[in-house]
Image (spheres, rainbow, N blue to C red):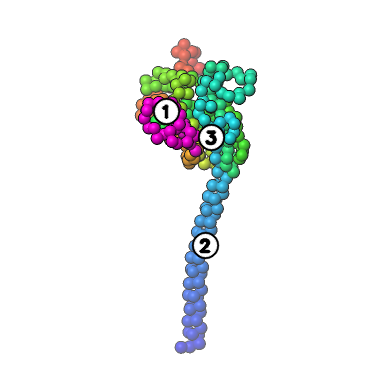
């Protein structure tokens, strides 16, 4: 083989080796990029978990998980309430503390009531638009008389007494600064005499009066006790409380 041919062969081998090395480097670079993505995703997940808010409903002494008898019921039964409150003495009310026990701020903090069957029986009570870590909000409100549309679009009325007597879960919903939804759930104490007066389920007496708070991701899946119109049926404007057009109104030119 001539010197020129030998040089050409060597050059071809070097070029092939260089191409192979370039391909190997491309694979390794791609693998490294994937590993970096995983590390970034893990770090972001850890960051989100670290700064996740944890909102807890407390009795107004700011020390114990809500005692339902102390936070929901007739206002005259609430202990330690300062004078001058505009809520009537015999009105049904809710008075509790929502505290953010997490390391990140909680946004759009609100709560509602569910009954023992896991159905929502109240609208949302807005507590705070933003609750910093370690801070709490003192919430007091009269339980309103609610009117909801029934199956035939006639009003279904829930009296405050009905809501106060049937509340079994206090559900607090909130969001993180990353746009994630969370909620906490506190069930009524199992040692409440009202729950064992029927003589059944005596084992409930051996359980703590105030069960711990349970935290969940997402929003409360409990269906509302009031009837909502079927999405497959036409919805009249009365459901949305929209004014009907005036037949005698002049036609716009």
Q: In the picture provided, is 69 more to the left or to the right than 233?
A: right
Packing grade of label 1 (10 A; few <14, some 14-19, many >=20) is: some
Mark 2, secondary structure of its residue:
helix
Q: Is residue 10 magenta?
A: no
Report the residue marked by disc 3.
Answer: 65
Question: Is the magenta region chiefly helix, strand or loop?
Answer: loop
Q: Is residue 35 visible?
A: yes
**Earlier residue among tags 2 and 1:** 2
Report the residue marked by disc 2.
Answer: 32
Image height check: is 1 above or below 58?
Answer: below
Q: Picture quarter containing residue 240? A: top left
- Marks 2 and 1, Cα distance to the nearest angstrom? 60 Å
Q: Picture quarter containing residue 247? A: top left
Packing grade of label 2 (10 A; few <14, some 14-19, many >=20) is: few
Q: Pinpoint residue 76: horizontal percent, then vertical percent.
A: 55, 19
- Please provide the residue range marked out in magenta: 187-212
């Amino acid at each position: 083989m001539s010197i020129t041919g030998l040089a050409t062969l060597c050059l071809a081998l070097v070029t092939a080796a260089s191409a192979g090395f370039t391909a190997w480097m491309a694979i390794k670079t791609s693998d490294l990029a994937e590993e970096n993505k995983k590390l970034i995703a893990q770090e972001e997940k850890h960051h989100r978990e670290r700064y996740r808010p944890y909102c807890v409903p407390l009795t107004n002494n700011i020390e114990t998980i809500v005692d339902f008898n102390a936070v929901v019921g007739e206002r005259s039964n609430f202990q330690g309430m300062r004078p001058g409150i505009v809520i009537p003495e015999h009105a049904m009310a809710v008075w509790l503390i929502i505290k953010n026990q997490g390391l990140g701020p909680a946004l759009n903090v609100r709560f509602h009531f569910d009954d023992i069957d896991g159905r929502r029986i109240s609208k949302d009570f807005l507590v705070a638009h933003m609750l910093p870590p370690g801070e709490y909000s003192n919430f007091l409100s009269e339980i309103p008389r609610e009117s909801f549309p029934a199956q035939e679009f006639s009003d279904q009325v829930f009296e405050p007494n009905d809501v106060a007597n049937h509340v079994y879960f206090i559900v607090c919903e909130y969001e993180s600064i990353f746009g994630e939804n969370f909620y906490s759930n506190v069930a009524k104490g199992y040692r409440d005499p009202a729950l064992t007066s029927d003589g059944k389920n005596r084992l409930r007496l051996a359980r703590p009066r105030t069960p711990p708070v349970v935290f969940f991701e997402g929003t409360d899946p409990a269906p509302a006790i009031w009837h909502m119109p079927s999405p497959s049926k036409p919805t009249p404007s009365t459901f949305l409380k929209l004014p009907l057009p005036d037949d005698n109104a002049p036609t716009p030119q």
